[in-house]
Image (spheres, grey):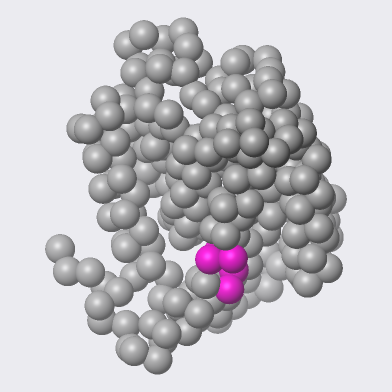
Amino acid sequence: MKLKIASVETLELKKIIAVFNREIGRFVLFVFVLFFDSLYFAEHVTPSQLPINILMFLGFLKMYFRSTPRVKESMIYAVIIGFLGEHFFSRGLDMYTYRLENVPHYVPLGHAALYGRILMFSKASVVRRNNQAIEQLFSYVIATLSLVYLIFFNDVFGFVMTLCVFLMLLKRPKDKLFFYAMYILVAILEIGGTAFGCWKWPNTAFGVFSFLPSHNPPSGISLFYFLLDVSCFMVYKLRNKTTWNRWKHIKSIASNNF
């Protein structure tokens, strides 16, 4: 199947790349900040997570004050929900384990920053104009990554979660761009974090289900990040009922006129 992105005009493509670099590329740089929580840094400098906590806090503040009101509000929700979710999945279910067997302070802040960056990317006008082409490209990247992990690393758990992502989005076509971007960014973050030894995943799902072998990290772990995204969206919707109903009304009128 021909890549739709190849048919996008050069000027539009340059704008898409610029938005991607601005909103998502900068967050990818945070992967290298994880070095300050790495096994090497802990052994040769200090085992404390204070340096990376400070860096993440400063980065969070910078992004927060440069964001739109909606993104700011969503980021606060993401910090709170991320804090609760991390304790539930990591400390409660032993789904994965951090280096110091805790939940580092920088992690919930990182969830919020990640959520905010992808929200801003997916809402950019040039991205919305070319959403189908970007969605197709991202879906191919995701499928390739998942198959590579399955074939070469026996990552059955990650492959199953990736299938769940695609199946879930069949009923949420308007959310594909956001969640595909989330999948890719989470995969990059997880690969970097586990490579540095900041956290690790067991050899099987939750360290319990032997019929679901897992790589460190599993490819489709963004499935659980979606719970954070959906939760943030629901909280925002409940907290802003009037604005949300007005937006739906305007959208309905526009659709009828069209």
Judged left or right of residue 106, residue 132 is: left
Magenta stretch? 22-26
Q: Residue at x 32, y 27 (%)?
A: 155
Q: Is residue 191 shown in magenta?
A: no
**Image location (x, y in percent) of residue 160:** 35, 29
**Image location (x, y in percent) of residue 43:** 63, 31
Q: Is residue 130 above or below residue 112?
A: below
Q: Residue at x 63, y 26 (%)?
A: 99
Q: Is residue 67 above or below residue 176?
A: below
Depth check, front residue: 77 or 187? 187
- Principal SS element in the magenta part? helix
**Image location (x, y in percent) of residue 230:** 63, 43
Depth check, front residue: 76 or 95? 95
Q: Residue at x 79, y 65 (%)?
A: 62
Camera sees residue 54: yes
**Residue sitting at the far bottom:** 11
Quadrant in which the N terminus is drawn: bottom left
Camera sees residue 89: no
Q: Is residue 172 above or below residue 108?
A: below
The quarter of the displayed image where residue 210 is located:
top left
Q: Residue at x 56, y 20 (%)?
A: 95
**Image location (x, y in percent) of residue 98:** 63, 26
**Residue sitting at the far front:** 44
Depth check, front residue: 197 or 162? 197
Depth check, front residue: 76 or 125? 76
